[in-house]
Image (tube, rainbow, N blue to C red):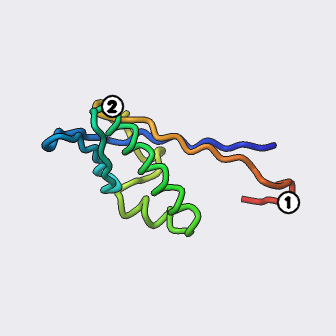
Amino acid sequence: MPTLTIKMKLPFVIEKEGEVYVGHCPVFDVYSQGCTAKEAELNTIEAVQVFVQTCIEMGTINQVMQESGFIPACQIKEDPSEENLVDVVLPYIASQNLSGCHV
């Protein structure tokens, strides 16, 4: 079965607020929290995955990416800094024969 994996490197902030840690992905303005910094990170990554998957399903991903400041990688002249970035992976598996699919 064909598979597709989308991998993004996104900026990420974790701050302690009272008794909890809050994770924030400023690119998409997505937040989550956890009892530890690691839990907040994992929960925020999951929240970003759900957000992006929902955008794909709704057909709004191009608009959201443009509004969030994304541009095609071929337009970048230098590699961006990888400081404070996390990997967000969205794995997809084809649910049917895609031999007739044309992109």
Residue at 85% from the left image edge and 59% from the top image edge: 100
Residue at x 41% of width, y 43% of height:
45
**Can residue 82 be seen?**
yes
Distance between the Cα atoms at labels 2 and 1? 43 Å
Which mark is in front, 2 or 1? 2
Viewer-side residue, 9 vs 48: 48
The residue drawn where x is 28% and y is 37% is 35
Q: Residue 96, position in %: x, y? A: 82, 55
Q: Quadrant of residue 76?
A: top left
What is the count of numbered marks? Answer: 2
In terms of secondary structure, where does tag 2 sit? helix
| Residue kind at label 2, given as amino acid type | Lys
Residue 38 badge: 2
Q: Is residue 51 left or right of residue 38?
A: right
Residue in view at x 35 percent, y 58 percent: 68
Is 55 placed above or below 40 here? Answer: below
- Vertical arrangement, residue 98 with respect to residue 44, above or below: below
- Residue 19's spot in the image, x, y percent? 17, 40
Residue 78 in sight in this render? no
Q: Residues within 10 Å of mark 2 (few under 14, many from 20)?
A: some
Pick the residue in front: 41 or 7. 41
Q: Which mark is residue 100?
A: 1
